[in-house]
Amino acid sequence: MRMRVLVTGAAGFLGSHLTDRLLSEGHSVIGVDNLSTGVISNLAHLHNEPRFVFEEGDICERLEWRDPGRVDYVFNLASPASPREYLRLPIETLRVGALGTENALEIAYRYGAGFLHASTSEC
């Protein structure tokens, strides 16, 4: 079954590799990242991939700025993940673990989508 998947933190190390894997399996991916620790160059090779859409945005804000359409699965990988980053961004790390997760869960609930949450232990 081909799915339409939302990946938060898509420009990060894990998010970009997961996106590549999902696309290689024939799925469509909506990638969201605020680029606070992720880098757009991790996704540059997908510039002309029609099954990939990138939205720069912060999941701590309600994602109503764009209705993603049908979503079958949400991978919530948005979180500063290294000690250097979460020490630099302590409040942001807490916000993404709480508000960001709530917003991602709301999307999964709205579409009856599956959900996987990955985080740093510092949350």
Image: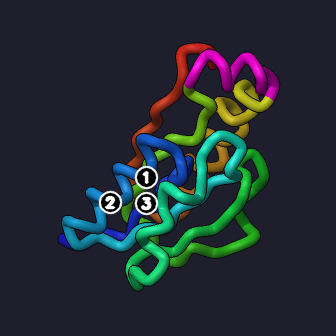
Give the labeled residue for mark 2: 20
Q: Mark 1 and 3 residues: CB-CB less than 8 Å, in contact?
A: no
Give the Cα distance between marks 1 and 3: 24 Å
Q: Mark 2 and 1 residues: CB-CB less than 8 Å, in contact?
A: yes
- Left or right: 18, with 81 as reference point: left
Residue 108 visible here: no
The magenta segment = 82-91
Q: Earlier in the sequence, mark 2 or mark 3?
A: 2
Q: Estimate the x, y position of residue 88 in percent, counting from the top left.
A: 77, 22
In percent of the image, x 60 and y 46: which residue is there? 38
Give the labeled residue for mark 1: 16
Locate the C terminus and report the quarter of the image it occupies. Answer: top right
Give the labeled residue for mark 3: 112
Q: Estimate the x, y position of residue 90 in percent, counting from the top left.
A: 77, 21
Farthest residue toward the right?
Answer: 91
Q: Estimate the x, y position of residue 27 in percent, counting from the top left.
A: 29, 70
